Every structure is written in C-alpha cells, then in structure tokens.
Image: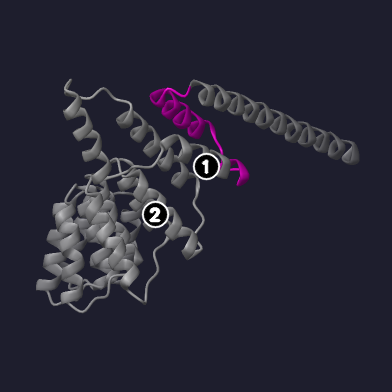
C-alpha cells in the first residue's frame, strides 16, 4: 500500500490523474486495500486535472468501502469542485464534513471561497469568511482575504474591499502584490461604473440608477483609494509594471489625465531605476568573475 500511495502521489504531482485513478482501481486485484492517504492522493490528482466528477465519485467510493475521509480528502474534493465551477457542491462539502465529524481547516474554507469567487458569488464568499472568523480554532490567512477582496472588487463592491483591508490590518496580515493588483482592478471597475453613460435619458431615471448603485455596493471614491494604494505600494516597494497599467487604466475611465500622466512618469522612473540596478549587479558579477580569473591564473 505504501508503494502505491507513493506512486499515486507522484502521478498527482505530475498531473497524471488518469494514471492515478487506474492505480487506485488496480489495488484490490492485487489484494491491497486503499487507505485514506491513497484516496486523498487520487482525489487531489483529479483536482489538478479538473476532474470534479471523478473526484466526487472517488469520495463516494471510499465512504462506501468504509474509509473515513479526513480534512485533506475533503479539501481536495472542494478544490476539485471549485475548478469545475461547481460552487454549490463545494459549499455543500463543507457542511458534509461537519456532519461526519471532520472539522474544516483554513485550506477547506479557502477552497470553498475560491469556488464561489470564480463564479461571482461575492456574498457567499463573505459569508464563508465570516464563518471562518467565528471559528475560534482558526484564523483567516492572506489567501482568505485575497479571495474575498477579489470577489468584491470584481463586482462593484469597492467599499467592502476597504473594510476587508481594515480587517487585515487588525489581524496583522500584510497585503501582498496580488492584493494590491486586485484592488486596482476594483478601482478601474468602479471608475468605469461611475463614469459610464446611464441607460435612460430621463433625469429621474438617472438619479434613481445612481442611488440604486450606491445602496447596493460601493460609494467610495475610486481615485482616492487608487492614490492610497499606489502610495502604500511605493512605501512597501511592491510597485510593478502591471500595477501601473491597472492604475493608469482606472484614471482613463475616471477622466483623471493628470494622475494618469503622473503615474506614467512614476512607471518610467521605476523602470529606469530597475534597469540601472540590474546593470550594477551585472557589472559587479563581471568584475567578480574577472578577479577570480586573476587569482587562479
């Protein structure tokens, strides 16, 4: 069994889900009984191969064969459902875990949140994050917050992303480059929504649409938030070309050409600094190499 587990695990890492499943099905004919490690590795292989139906089939078979899934097994199955766009099944598996006495961990929650984020169910993502926070034995991770921020930012909930950033600060979790990029995408989407032409030409309809938007989501100024994000990134030395592109795109939609021009200058200055730093490192390496040659000759 140990040998099969190792080979199936190797197939999983090599994204050979078909071979992993074939090995699992072969074991009984060899007089071997798969254990929880075997099934978990096979389900994980299916997850990496985006085979959610097969993953759930293996999960069902292992339970029928009297093998109790553990948190690793369920987390892999949840992730498989997420990759297959099956967000409802992913969330249901969290409930199934609890019913069978298996406590979800942060990985389980993150997988379910990711499944919901992929299909735009930001409300469910926030609900799952709240459940995670309420579990006194667990703490949300950077991935948890990044997933929630992505879900909100992509669907016009910029004010909620600010709340999530505040929660991260309270929890002592530092945003990373992925966090900031997602926030900049949210600023671009919000700027586009605030400056798009209304569908109706009637003034009353226009006022109603604006009020409707503000009551359902973000009322935050995207340009004010953008400037804060860029300043924070600069302070933490996390700025990159992609971030500048996203920020400039947001300025374009908001009609802030002065800010866009300033960001373009900052981008060019950062590029020049990067090239200069690279050249210095290259020169130092070259001189070091020449000195080594002199010592050995």
**How dense is the environment of label 2, judged by Cα within 10 Å: few (below 14), some, or many (20 and up)?**
few
Residue positioned 28% across, 57% down in the render: 126
| Residue at the image position 43 percent from the left and 60 percent from the top | 167
Q: Which residue is drawn at 76% across and 32% down?
A: 280
Badge 1, how many Cα within 10 Å: few under 14, some, many 20+? few
Q: On the picture, is 266 further left or further right than 217?
A: right
Q: Is residue 155 magenta?
A: no
Q: In front: 115, or 254?
A: 254
- Compare residues 113 and 13 and report the one nearer the observer: 113
In the rendered view, tell whether residue 223 sits above or below residue 95: above
Residue that appears at 51% across and 31% down? 244
Nearer-the-camera pick, 42 or 176: 176
Residue 61 position within the rendered picture, expressed as x and y whole percent measured from the top left: 11, 67
Q: How far apart are marks 1 and 2 (CA)?
A: 14 Å
**Whole-percent x and y of residue 237?**
61, 43
Residue assigned mark 1: 228
Q: Give the labeled residue for mark 2.
A: 163
Magenta-highlighted residues: 233-256
- Whether residue 81 appears in this view of the structure is yes
Q: Can you give x and y, in whole percent of width and height, for residue 32 in the image?
A: 20, 73
The answer to whether any part of residue 19 appears in the image is: no
Q: Is mark 2 on a helix, strand or loop?
A: helix
First in residue order: circle 1 vs circle 2: 2
Quarter of the figure that contains the C terminus: top right
Closer to the camera in the image, 180 or 42: 180
Kindly indicate whether the residue at mark 2 contacts the one at mark 1 (C-beta within 8 angstroms).
no
* Total marks in image: 2
Predominant secondary structure, magenta span: helix
Secondary element type, mark 1: helix
């Amino acid at each position: 069994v140990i040998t099969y587990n190792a080979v199936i695990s190797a197939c999983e890492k090599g994204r050979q889900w078909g071979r992993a499943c074939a090995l699992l099905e072969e074991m009984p004919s060899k007089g071997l009984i798969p254990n929880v490690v075997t099934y978990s590795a096979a389900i994980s292989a299916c997850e990496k191969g985006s085979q959610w139906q097969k993953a759930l089939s293996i999960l069902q078979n292992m339970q029928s064969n009297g093998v109790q899934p553990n948190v690793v097994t369920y987390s892999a199955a949840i992730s498989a459902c997420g990759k297959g766009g099956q967000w409802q099944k992913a969330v249901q598996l969290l409930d199934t875990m609890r019913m069978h006495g298996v406590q979800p961990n942060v990985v389980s929650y993150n997988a379910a949140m990711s499944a919901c984020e992929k299909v735009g169910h930001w409300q469910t993502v926030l609900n799952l994050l709240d459940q995670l926070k309420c579990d006194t034995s667990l703490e949300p991770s950077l991935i948890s917050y990044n997933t929630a921020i992505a879900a909100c930012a992509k669907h016009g909930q910029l004010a909620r992303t600010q709340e999530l950033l505040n929660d991260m600060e309270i929890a002592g979790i530092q945003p990373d480059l992925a966090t900031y990029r997602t926030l900049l995408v949210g600023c671009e989407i919000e700027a586009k929504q605030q400056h798009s032409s209304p569908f109706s030409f009637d003034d009353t309809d226009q006022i109603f649409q604006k009020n409707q938007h503000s009551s359902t989501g973000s009322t935050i100024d995207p340009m004010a938030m953008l400037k804060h994000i860029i300043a924070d990134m600069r302070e933490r030395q996390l700025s990159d070309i992609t971030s500048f592109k996203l920020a400039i795109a947001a300025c374009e939609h908001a009609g802030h050409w002065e800010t866009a021009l300033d960001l373009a200058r900052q981008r060019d200055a950062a590029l020049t600094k990067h090239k200069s730093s690279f050249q210095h490192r290259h020169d130092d390496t070259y001189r070091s190499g020449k000195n080594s040659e002199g010592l050995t000759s």
